[in-house]
Image (cartoon, rainbow, N blue to C red):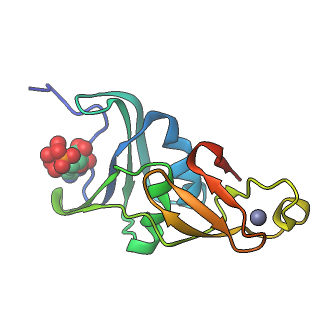
Amino acid sequence: MEKHLKVSAIKDGTVIDHIPTKALFKVMKILQLEECLEMITFGNNLDSKAMGTKSIIKIANRFFADEEVNKIALVAPHAKLNTIRDYEVIEKRVVETPREIIGIINCFNPKCITNAETITTRFEVLSNKPITMKCLYCEKITNENEMVYS
Ligand code: CTP
Ligand code: ZN
């Protein structure tokens, strides 16, 4: 039994748990947390039985819509979202890979217009495991191991 939480409990808000350690700052970027004025606490390289190490982010007074959190599926496919109200976990959600990805990832094709000009990338997700995405501009495929975050 743990003596105390590594990252303090919150009263109201969202706890994003089971984030891979290497994805912590990408998740923060995808959710635009640098612009969030609420209290944010996080832990990185925490011990996890299931994952070895993991990260956790706690955002006070913020509640996310499904389409907002699903964007993190690319980097944190096993993330669990806990909605906290008055210190109680009232809902647990898992993330689902969206069918379309806007921004976040660069197109793998160096000749793609999105790499030459400041155009936001758009991909259709063709498969989930491993992730395969088709660029809507050049139609080339970007695979999971080729993904570069913009
Ligand atoms: N939590 C929190 N503040 C609260 C309640 C819960 O920060 N007021 C956090 C817990 O520290 C935990 C997560 O929310 O990281 C989920 O809480 P809980 O469901 O109680 O934990 P577990 O059963 O361990 O969750 P899991 O479903 O991941 O096994
Ligand atoms: Zn492209």
Identify the residue at horizontal 55%, vertical 58% (top origin): 132
**Where ligand 2 lies, by quadrant?**
bottom right
Identify the residue at horizontal 47%, vertical 69% (top origin): 98
Q: Residue furthest right?
A: 116
**Can the viewer see residue 91 in this picture?**
yes
Image quarter (top left, top right, bottom left or bottom right) of the N terminus:
top left
- Above or below residue 67? Residue 51 is above
Quadrant in the picture for residue 19:
top left
Q: Is 96 on the left or on the right of 34, as rendered? A: left
Pick the front one: 42 or 101:
101
Q: Is 64 on the left or on the right of 138, as rendered? A: left
**Rendered location of residue 66, percent (x, y):** 38, 72
> What is the total number of numbered labels drawn onto the structure image?
0
- Above or below residue 94? Residue 122 is below
**Rendered location of residue 54, percent (x, y):** 37, 34
**Can the viewer see residue 9 in this picture?**
no
Pick the front one: 102 or 141:
141
Pick the front one: 150 or 137:
137
**Rendered location of residue 70, percent (x, y):** 43, 65
Quadrant in the picture for residue 18:
top left
Identify the residue at horizontal 59%, vertical 53% (top origin): 29
